Image (cartoon, rainbow, N blue to C red):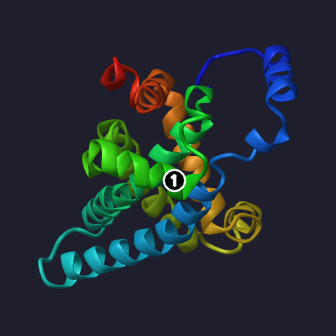
Amino acid sequence: MLHGIKIGPAFNQLHSEGVTFLYRGVFPPLLQKTFSLSLMFGVYDGVKRPSIDLYGMNEYTAKCFAGMVAGTFEAILMPFERIQTVLADAAYHEKYQNTHHAFRLIISEHGIKELYRGLFPVLIRNGPSNAVFFVLREEAQKLPHKVTHSIKTFLLINFNDNYRKDLFIQIFSNLHPEQWLARSRVQSFILLMLLR
């Protein structure tokens, strides 16, 4: 996705670089996923309940609002996406050895602000996709058992929350693919202009 190359040249590149670069950058998304789910559900529940109980907000408005806030809070973990993008870019294979090294060098050379490059598209993705996810998730849990047993079983048993959220993010991302390509290119552009 980052370079827009076809599968044949991608395999040739993999062959020339070696298998070690195939898993380069896998640690940041693992860390991000670990923290992101607990943060997402915790913030959602912490915002939704008081919105309804204390402020008398409409249930659906509160779900959307809490989902947007949860998605915005999830953007705190954006440095993991940033480091993953940098480690995946062949232009930085020699400069950054691993995740820790990349974090350390980027912060020391460019400051913490550099880890949040491309934040706006991430905020646009996270907020609305979380809002849609939580509204549909809670509505699916309310479905009557007899009428929609097969749909409810498919949504609630066959897919856990992680897969459903990823599905909503993919649907939302595919509505505007140019936005996500732009985010990846902005993030991979980290030092090219600064080093010139």
For this rendering, which residue is in front, 127 or 34?
A: 34
For this rendering, which residue is in front, 188 or 65?
A: 188
Q: Is residue 82 left or right of residue 145?
A: left
Image quadrant holding the C terminus, namely top left
**Looking at the image, which residue is at 29% across and 74% down?**
48
Q: Can residue 38 be seen in this view?
A: yes
**Looking at the image, which residue is at 39% across and 31% down?**
190
Q: Is residue 138 visible?
A: no
Task: Give the residue type that dot 1 points to.
Answer: His
Image quadrant holding the N terminus, namely top right
**Looking at the image, which residue is at 43% across and 61% down?**
135
Q: Where 45 falls versus 135 (above or below)?
A: below
Q: How many marks?
A: 1
Residue under pointer 1: 101
Q: Where 195 falls versus 80 (above or below)?
A: above
For this rendering, which residue is in front, 55 or 18?
A: 18
Across and down, in percent, residue 130 comes to: 42, 56
Across and down, in percent, residue 157 comes to: 74, 71
Query: Judging from the image, what secondary structure is the residue with disc 1 in?
Result: helix
Q: Where 162 falls versus 196 (above or below)?
A: below
Q: In this view, does 114 lie to the left or right of 51?
A: right
Across and down, in percent, residue 90 comes to: 62, 28
Across and down, in percent, residue 78 comes to: 40, 52
Specify few, some or many for label 1: CA neighbours under 10 Å numbering under 14, 14-19, or 20 or more: few
**Looking at the image, which residue is at 70% across and 15% down?**
5
The residue most toward the bottom is 53
